[in-house]
Amino acid sequence: MLQNRVPADAISPDRLVAVPPHVLIYTLDLNTHAAVEDQPTEAIATTAAEVLRKNVDRQRARFADREALAACGPACAKFYQWGGRATLEIGLQREQIKSFGFHSVSDWAFHDDLSAVRASLGADFILFVTLKQTRQPNGQRTVYAPGHTYIHGAQIDAACVADLRDGAMVWCTSLQDDIGDLADPGRVLVAIHAMLKGLFVRVPPRS
């Protein structure tokens, strides 16, 4: 199991900003090659962003939408893409689907200067969420792809917090769901809430 660098209660919601979730919906062809489905991905991403925004708002954290990231400039764009990819990799290793050979989430670190990102977003910590689902050619979810070196989870979701002061991941959680379908907005809500309840354990919701 990958070790977190800090416990959840060491991450102050007042200094935390969440960014729009990364959503990856893949369909495997008959040769088990994966292709991204743009239309369902966009629809699910819209739902996931709204669910995440409501979750962090209740906990007195903040949400930076895509307009805020665009205003931040290329540094934010590069860090945002790295964060989504690193969060997925951490989820894959936590769920024992693919090992990247690391022992701590902090082994995933962004090495460029983040001072401009930190100043633009006004935060010390940033929350990434990645939702990934793999489907068979007929649209059904798939668990195993013949000929591959590891099992494709029907749904792998992960949430990670990175420290903007040094670029390292400090806290992550994940889940694997071989029953639900991200096309159902209710499943998106369940997945995001399940992951974030461990992060916001000590902050009472707004009345």
Image (tube, helix red, strand yellow):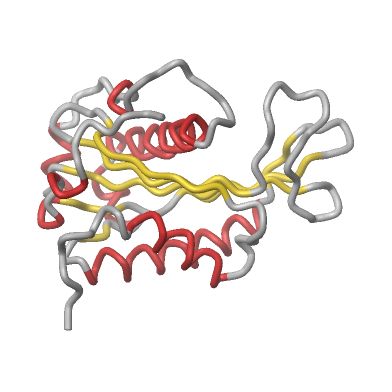
Q: Position of residue 37 (x, y in %)?
A: 69, 50
Residue 49 place in picture, x, y as percent:
41, 62
Q: Position of residue 154 (x, y in %)?
A: 67, 47
Q: Residue furthest bottom?
A: 207
Horizontal side of residue 156 vs 55, given as left or right: right
Q: Residue at x 20, y 74 (%)?
A: 205
Q: Going 15% across and 40% down the picture, which residue do you hit?
A: 118
Relative to the observer, which residue lies in front, 174 or 17? 174
Number of marks in picture: 0
Between 89 and 34, the one lying in front of the other is 89
Q: Residue furthest top?
A: 101
Question: Residue 60 placed where, x, y %?
Answer: 16, 66
Q: Residue at x 16, y 70 (%)?
A: 204
| Looking at the image, residue 74 lies above or below residue 10 | above
Residue 152 vertical placement versus 195 (above, below): above
Task: Check the image and name the residue furthest to the front.
Answer: 1
Q: Quadrant of the C terminus?
A: bottom left
Horizontally, is 150 left or right of 156 in the view?
right
Rendered image quadrant of residue 78: top left
* Left or right: 183 in relation to 104: right
Which quadrant holds the N terminus? top left
Query: Residue, x 24% and y 69% (percent of image)?
Result: 57
In the image shown, does 59 or 22 lie closer to the viewer? 59
Q: Where 193 sits versus 111, above or below?
A: below
**Quarter of the image holding residue 5?**
top left
